[in-house]
Image: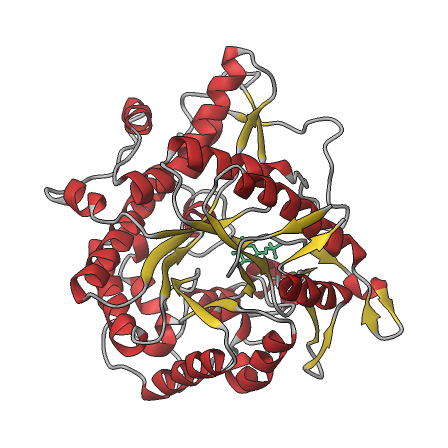
Amino acid sequence: MKYQFPEAFWWGSASSALQTEGESQPDARGETTWDRWYQQQPTRFHQQVGPQDTSTFYQHWREDIALLKQLNHNSFRTSISWSRLIPDGTGEVNPQAVAFYNNVIDELLAQGIKPFITLFHFDMPLVMQQQGGWESRAVVEAFSRYARLCFELFGDRVLHWFTFNEPIVPVEGGYLYDFHYPNVVDFKRAATAAYHTVLAHAQAVRAFRAGQYPGEIGIVLNLTPSYPRSQHPADVKAAHHADLLFNRSFLDPVLRGEYPADLVALLQSYDQLPACQPGDAELIADGKIDLLGINYYQPRRVKCRDSAVNLQSPFMPEWLFDNYEMPGRKMNPYRGWEIYEPGIYDILTNLRVNYDNPRCFISENGMGVENEQRFNQNGQINDQYRIEFVTGHLKWLHKGISEGSQCLGYHMWTFIDNWSWCNAYKNRYGFVQLDLATQQRTVKKSGEWFARTAVDNGFNE
Ligand code: BGP
């Protein structure tokens, strides 16, 4: 069967500034929370590799864009580093950063590759974090100034903007589960940070609309469909709660312009609602997007709690549900995440049926592999597993499109193996293998496969 995709489908991949750029000396960019955390606690990072050890995109941008072209990308997402552009978050603009991002954008366009630009991909300038990070309304203001500056500088050429990448991840990581700075565990503070992120997003959208820049603006959300263990009402309710907290807390504001009433009621019942101010509801209503990026890696399996919660302990999401290890689920043996290809179709169907079928695309999907070097044959990584992973997901994506979903493209995570936060280089995801020591790049089998698929706009099976 031929899986043919719509005309002008976006084929490409995604990456981010901090994970690839390098050049993190004080005169090149301001410190981020990651630089500081790594200095303080290097052992929290896999093999103690920190954010300075990258594929050095800051130097190799021209060569890497040539590789993107070789892999027949017609689009590519990366982020601008706030701390490179404005080292202290609010003050002087760094002219070297402006020149660098101009070079990247111009070269992408010269090679026929649409630049998709994210404004915030986990890399909070340290100064902004010291002023409260997303818990602070002042930082919300600062973000919208930074966003406006990016639209002014690059908006004549960048036509696809994304305010945030996976905004819930810094909230979960930084305020609930201790895998991002500032390593706090406090639900109310998490809820406040999440709420202010939504406000920051909406202010940036307002600025974009007010400036009448060409192109469109969206956000990238990691959506994890929540499947209940059974149809027992208690399991179904648990899955609904997980969905409210981890998907709809961002999805509803950006697509419907408001929070789900049952999420508000739920948080209120546990006294966990963040403080709001007059005008917030109007601001959130103005934050509706033109384009949704969907990151999909794995679903969430949920069951009701088997034991009562200790009401003396601080509130946590796990009061409302338990994660469920479904027997027989298909696992990625090299990363430990479930592989469930129909999840991508379920996301599209949910958006089509319940959210008025928004314009969207898959902005990340990918397969992480530990010790991938073991699959090296004659100097090339033979990653047949990754080709199967991508085809499996593309088939379900194709089905969603054939039923009417407005899914406009598919971007893989990621282009070149990159530094991945606390996991550093533990799990490799790239189409291109990176030798960190020599900086040599070698296209993997999956990269060659992707190049053919992009040029054929589909594949046969
Ligand atoms: C996504 C992030 C990426 C990247 C990826 C891989 O959620 O957007 O920035 O980190 O996950 O994650 P890991 O290396 O933990 O497998």
Q: Residue at x 56, y 64 (%)?
A: 12
The residue at the far right in this view is 378
Position of 88 compared to 401: left or right?
left
Position of 350 compared to 1: left or right?
left
The relative height of residue 26 versus residue 352 in the rendered view (above or below) is below
Position of 229 compared to 81: left or right?
right
Which picture quadrant has residue 392? top right
The relative height of residue 300 versus residue 250 in the rendered view (above or below) is above
Question: For this rendering, which residue is in front, 226 or 437?
Answer: 226
Report how many numbered discs are placed on residues in the image: 0
Which picture quadrant has residue 187? top left
Residue 215 in view of the camera: yes
Q: Position of residue 369 (x, y in %)?
A: 73, 56
The residue at the far top in this view is 232
Q: Quadrant of the N terminus?
A: top right
Q: Position of residue 142 (x, y in %)?
A: 23, 64
Residue 89 in view of the camera: no
Q: Residue at x 66, y 61 (%)?
A: 429
Question: For this rendering, which residue is in front, 382 or 66?
Answer: 66
Q: Residue at x 32, y 84 (%)?
A: 94
The relative height of residue 311 versus residue 348 in the rendered view (above or below) is above
The relative height of residue 5 versus residue 252 in the rendered view (above or below) is below
Which picture quadrant has residue 366? bottom right
Q: Position of residue 216 (x, y in %)?
A: 32, 60
